[in-house]
């Protein structure tokens, strides 16, 4: 390898074989995978989110506040940042990027190559380019907070950034809308502290790959097949178990999470199974379209198709 500070990033649309490529590359390059999937970071969200794990296989390495950092071994490869928290916990791009940076530092000390794999492009962008204290509105977090009282919101802000709470005047302290905005900013940047991106640090050599389908019909076919595979693997049983454990659609891990939302609606009788599956597929199509837009507008990424994103093709870039 040309540079022992190499980091490989593999992102792309849903159902493009990112994890398979990452595992093959990790074996070839003495690397570990860092999952950049916002839903795989939640415990118990296994089948629909696409984890291929054994529960007894997890090794906890360190704590980061409420988050657990560790790895599963899959096909002989360590896969990090699965199961960081419960579905009731809020995990921001900032929290994930801090965790990823910690694990990447550990890997380089061990002379292993970090291979970041996942489709949560906001997480990847935060790690690469950083995050300032000027946070964009977090619609997911906002939805989860809108029914909480001012007292509850004050407590949440205190936990994230007590100085920000103390700085509020009495009017703002009892204004839910302003409290939520302060919570958004604190959650996004860990209490308002900027997160420096790894690219600007100038320490690492990056190989960034975006895997995209050129043909929409082909993309939809692969998504349809993956949805059916998740159902065959026990997606309905997983949702039933989650609801039995007390998790609800409004919890952070479930909010807007494709597959879980639709099957929970079926579980509650709001949709037929056929309607739930159809809506699940449509949401996957829409998400894949958004992923393509984000990735194609980032000049750091070399774009390719799933059939061309082979191990040999990536190794030629290394």
Image (cartoon, rainbow, N blue to C red):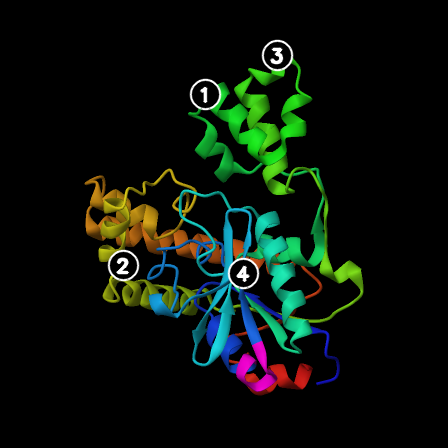
Mark-to-mark CA distance, 4 and 1: 33 Å
Residue 12 sits in which quadrant? bottom right
Which residue shows up at 68% across the image and 73% down it?
A: 109
Instruction: Indicate left or right for 318 with 70 as reference.
Output: right
Q: Residues within 10 Å of mark 1 (few under 14, many from 20)?
A: few
Residue tagged by mark 4?
36
In the image, 260: left or right of 149? left
Q: Earlier in the sequence, mark 2 or mark 3?
A: 3
Q: Quadrant of residue 83?
A: bottom left
Spatial CA span between label 3 and label 4: 39 Å
**Residue 17 visible at all:** no
- Which residue position is annotated with label 3? 171
Cα distance between the residues tagged 2 and 1: 35 Å
Q: Secondary structure at mark 3?
A: helix
- The range drawn in magenta is 26-31
Please count the marks in the image: 4
| Residue 1 spot, x, y in % from top left | 70, 85
Nearest to viewer (mark 4 / mark 1): 1
Mark linked to residue 235: 2
Q: Is residue 51 magenta?
A: no
Q: Residue at x 36, y 56 (%)?
A: 45
Instruction: Find numbered disc 2 in the image and state the secondary structure of the residue it sits on.
Output: helix
Q: Which mark is residue 149?
A: 1
Which residue appears at 35% of the width and 68% of the height?
56
How far is disc 3 from disc 1 in space, using C-alphas? 15 Å
Mark 3, Cα crowd under 10 Å, few <14 / some 14-19 / many 20+, is: few
- Identity of the residue drawn at 80% across and 65% down: 202
- The residues bearing labels 4 and 2 have C-alpha atoms spaced at a distance of 21 Å
Closer to viewer: mark 3 or mark 4: 3
């Amino acid at each position: 390898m040309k540079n022992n500070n190499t980091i490989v990033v593999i992102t792309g649309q849903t159902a493009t074989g990112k994890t398979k490529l990452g595992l093959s590359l990790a074996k070839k390059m003495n690397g570990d995978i860092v999952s950049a999937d916002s839903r795989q970071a939640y415990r118990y969200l296994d089948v629909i989110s696409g984890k291929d794990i054994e529960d007894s296989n997890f090794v906890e390495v360190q704590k980061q506040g409420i988050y657990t950092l560790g790895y599963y071994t899959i096909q002989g490869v360590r896969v990090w940042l699965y199961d960081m928290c419960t579905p009731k916990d809020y995990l921001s791009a900032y929290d994930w990027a801090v965790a990823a940076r910690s694990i990447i530092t550990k890997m380089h000390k061990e002379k292993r190559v970090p291979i970041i794999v996942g489709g949560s492009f906001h997480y990847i962008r935060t790690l690469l380019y950083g995050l300032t204290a000027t946070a964009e509105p977090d619609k997911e977090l906002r939805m989860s907070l809108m029914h909480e009282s001012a007292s509850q919101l004050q407590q949440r802000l205190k936990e994230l950034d007590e100085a920000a709470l103390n700085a509020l005047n009495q009017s703002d302290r009892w204004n839910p809308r302003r409290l939520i905005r302060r919570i958004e900013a604190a959650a996004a940047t860990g209490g308002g502290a900027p997160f420096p991106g790894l690219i600007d640090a100038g320490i690492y050599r990056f190989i960034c790959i975006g895997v995209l389908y050129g043909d929409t019909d082909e993309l939809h076919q692969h998504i349809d097949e993956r949805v059916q595979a998740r159902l065959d693997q026990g997606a309905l049983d997983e949702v039933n178990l989650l609801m039995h454990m007390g998790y609800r659609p409004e919890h952070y891990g479930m909010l807007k999470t494709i597959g879980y939302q639709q099957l929970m609606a079926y579980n509650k009788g709001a949709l037929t199974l056929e309607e739930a599956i159809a809506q699940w597929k449509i949401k996957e199509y829409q998400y894949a379209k958004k992923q393509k837009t984000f990735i194609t507008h980032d000049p750091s990424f070399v774009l390719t198709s799933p059939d061309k994103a082979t191990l040999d093709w990536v190794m030629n870039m290394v």
